[in-house]
Amino acid sequence: MATGSETPAPYPELATNCVGDQGVAAWAGPQFSCHAVHVRVDRETGVARVLDVSAAHDSGTILNPLGALGQIEGGITMGIGQALSEGTRYDDTGRQLNPGLLEYKLQTAADTPTVRTCFIEPGGEGAGPRGAKGLAEAPNVATAAAISNAIAQVIGQPVRQLPMTAERVWLTANELLHSEISNGTGGES
Amino acid sequence: MSFLIARSIDDAVAAMAQGARPVAGGSDLVVGARHGVDSLPDDLVAIDRIRELAQIEVNTDGCAIGAGVTHARLMVDETIVRRYPGLADAAALVGSPATRNVGTVGGNIMNGSPAMDTGAPLLVLEATVELRSEVGTRTLPIAGLWTGPRHTAASATELCTSIFLSTPRDRSSSAYVRLEYRRAMEIAVVGAAASVQLNDDGTIAATKIALTAVAPTVVAISVDLIGRPADEQALAMVAAAASDQATPISDLRASDHYRRHTIGVMAKRAFDAAARRAQGEHIAVPVNRTLGIGASS
Ligand SMILES: Cc1cc2nc3c(=O)[nH]c(=O)nc-3n(C[C@H](O)[C@H](O)[C@H](O)COP(=O)(O)OP(=O)(O)OC[C@H]3O[C@@H](n4cnc5c(N)ncnc54)[C@H](O)[C@@H]3O)c2cc1C
């Protein structure tokens, strides 16, 4: 790909081949989203639990409502795991210490909160075919940040590392984080 | 390589005398083999279809729980929930519904993991364990069963047949809580059980506290609370004693430092729930969910 800076060429209004505009415009129509979460933190242990999530998404006209809803709920569940429990860990030689699903902790069905989804469908301005825009990874982008903000509100400062494990939340709440985990074994995400 | 399905305790101990390993639910044995903890034994005897092992018998002395009773049954059995709620608290937290449906209390204690959930409540309830081999039957206090991580005082030819719990005294109860990072498919990061017996004036007549996953085996700790009210000060004493007497390690799940802190929190919560139950308060099984431990709703 090229480097440098310039104003990109305008997207083709309509390509002339058989697949119409190739869906390219769907990428150009920016999608916006916002997540709000309700989190409970056990202050004595640092365990955080997400009780409710509300998700508002502008993905243009929703063509497949059930599929889009599933995408949002799945993305949010993944985002909660990213926020609280999922993180690969390695030893000094680069071997993964938690290669199985007992130690690499995904969120389970029992952990999954109520998710309320609201699709904002503002019409097809700048969007792709039939007014659709992308959805894809957007449902997974805001979740961890929202959870982080909520935890920060409870304990007084943000946890600056993902996943925000119970131990890290507890250490941060007690302002011990930097002295305690400077040994570099923390899982990065 | 042989696999025998035992129909009776006699069948099972005969096979064990020939070198076969018992398999109940297989949720430790098979999973351990898959993860390279141990290789799968050459000779196995399945004990999950032995009726005598799957019974809970109650008489005036107490309650004998067959080694083959599953966690799914323990957590809802009326006698267990009413008289020994700490054991039901623990059974209800094991793994997932699937794990609880196959996993047995006998397999849990005989596997000997320091993170086993039913161990600490059985210890504070002063359980005795019945072991049977072709040579005979013996009983031993459960405190003497675990000799190290994944090691027990039972010989390879001894089948655990039942676990006996005495009838609880009046104004007594028990509870078990654990620190967990998620609500299913979890292993205790740390856990604590307490039994509390109260005097008529509400002061403590007797108490026992045991800890999960902070030592090479499940361990009992000592804290002198006799004659005191079960108040904030007692809770602080329990927390301090648990944190002091634990000897935790650091691993993937937690640092030793964090375990030492949280075991104090768990011990005081277990003690508090047991004391409140002993006073007659209904705290539904499992305490973890009812009291929001692990920040559950
Ligand atoms: C996904 C998953 C989650 C889990 N979560 C938890 C948890 O939260 N808490 C917890 O404590 N455990 C947990 N476990 C471990 C396991 O499920 C329990 O320890 C269970 O109680 C084991 O019982 P079992 O009948 O399956 O034992 P098995 O695997 O059949 O046997 C375990 C060991 O005990 C021996 N044994 C079994 N029965 C007897 C007997 N009657 N006499 C003598 N020896 C015997 C076997 O030879 C073997 O060595 C989990 C396991 C899995 C796979």
Image (spheres, rainbow, N blue to C red):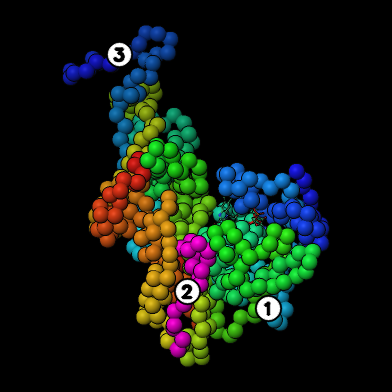
Seen in the picture, residue A181 relative to B234 is either above or below; the reply is above
- Label 3 resides on the chain identified as A
Asked whether the viewer can see residue B36, the reply is yes
Residues under labels 1 and 3: Cα distance?
82 Å
Q: Which residue is mark 3?
A: A12
* Residue depicted at x 36% and y 35%: A138
* Residue depicted at x 39% and y 53%: A50
Q: Secondary structure at mark 2?
A: strand
Look at the image and give the residue range highlighted in magenta.
B210-227
Q: Secondary structure at mark 3?
A: loop
Q: Residues within 10 Å of mark 2 (few under 14, many from 20)?
A: some
Asked whether the viewer can see residue B82, the reply is no
Residue B215 location, x and y as percent? 48, 63
Picture quadrant of residue B228: bottom left
Q: Which mark is residue B221?
A: 2
Residues under labels 3 and 2: Cα distance?
75 Å
Contact between marks 1 and 3 (CB within 8 A): the answer is no
Q: Which mark is residue B62?
A: 1
Q: Secondary structure at mark 1?
A: strand
Are tags 2 and 1 found on a single chain?
Answer: yes
- The residue lying toward the viewer, choosing from B238 and B19, is B19
Whichever of labels 2 and 1 marks the residue nearer the N terminus, that label is: 1
Q: Amino acid at mark 2?
A: Ile
Quarter of the rendering occupied by the N terminus of chain B: top right
Are tags 3 and 2 found on a single chain?
Answer: no
Say left or right for A162 vs B83.
left
Q: Amino acid at mark 3?
A: Pro
Residue B188 location, x and y as percent? 49, 58
Say left or right for A28 vs A91.
left
